[in-house]
Amino acid sequence: MVENESFYEESKLCNYIDGGPKHDSFYNKDGLLLRNYSWIVKNAIGIIILVHGLYSHARLGFLRHNINIISNHEAVLNDSDNYYIYKDSWIEEFNKNGYSVYGLDMQGHGESDGYNDLKHHVNNFDDFVYDLLQYVMLINSSLSIEDEEVNTNIEDDEQNVNITIPPIYLIGFSMGGNIVLRALEILGKSKELQKRLNIKGCISLSPMISVNALGSIDSRQFNYFFKPLIKMVSCLFTLWRLPFMNKIRFPNNSYVNDIHFLDKVRFDKGMTFKLAYELLRGMQNLSDNINDIPEDISVYIIHSLKDCVCYYGDTVSFFDRLYNNNKELLSIDNVDHVIVMEPGNEEVLKKIISWLSEVQERENLIHIN
């Protein structure tokens, strides 16, 4: 990976209020520079890789924010230069429980380059997925090298030369919830890659399996109206941006909107028509290839019945169709879409950590037997 020294300086200036992550980067298959961050613990029991949603980025999506919440409908800024707070965040809690955490700014988001030098734009939805898998491979390789270095300092016998990589867990929110599930589909087509990457679990939060505004992906309005319409518009006006689409309002906890709007790293314009069409393709591809998801990678889906963005009904349908030995769906009703930030997110986090522990125990029993 390519280190960027300026990011290290920034983290020093903010006195590690964001937890002092390692700032790194790599070039993807299209030559785009993708920024990434890691909060490492010693002797990690597992590796968590976070995938943010649309119009967000890794630190915005999973750290806390330097704001004052006035009410459920308003938040005010404290410090835009030190906006991301590690303390009491999901990332800190994962670290406390023994997990090293990695986060990637997807292309066109956060500090990462965008296709054609554009934010909120992509050539193909699966490019997000391949970027994630490349990132997982880079993490896996770096851990292998570290383990080999340790082994060279101890007695060289059969037990010591075996490289042990901690289990990897993917956690994605909204668009990221689609990306992590789609990554499993691609993994399912390669047993060799699946074994090499050591991904043991996938958590999909408020997944973008379909969106409320367009209806179910199996509906006539989606397949015979919205999909062909957006395809046509994306061909004619590829780089035009959808107005107001970056300002979806969450009616019950609209201070979440302020959290996004107050972030100076976040690009404040809507998505291109091309990205809009690729999102539809991403939803369709995820549904069409569901049988490629490996049966032995545990899947945990968490979705709110009151989600105003992503359609809960299609999540249930997807879960029912999923053939998997260890799958679980948690339906909640006290939040809206952004379950990582809204009141009650702490309880969701506890459920996730408990689920991770159960998966770890199950994997340990498999190895013992």
Image (cartoon, grey):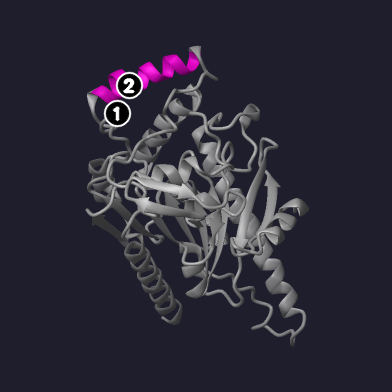
Question: Which residue shows up at 58% across the image and 55% down it?
Answer: 136
Residue at left offset 48%, top offset 28%? 270
- Residue, disc 1: 214
- Is residue 11 shown in magenta? no
Q: Tell me if I can see residue 174 in this picture.
A: no
Rendered view: 343 above or below 129 = below
Give the magenta-colored segment's residue range: 221-235
User: Would you name the residue on which mark 2 appears?
Assistant: 226
Q: Position of residue 219 (x, y in %)?
A: 23, 28
First reached walking from the N terminus: tag 1 or tag 2: 1
Query: Residue 64 location in percent, x, y?
Result: 48, 58
Q: Position of residue 303 (x, y in %)?
A: 29, 51
Mark 2 packing: few (<14 Cα in 10 Å), some, or many (20+)?
some
> Is label 1 in a helix, a strand or a loop?
loop
Above or below residue 293? Residue 42 is below
Say which quarter of the image contains residue 308: top left
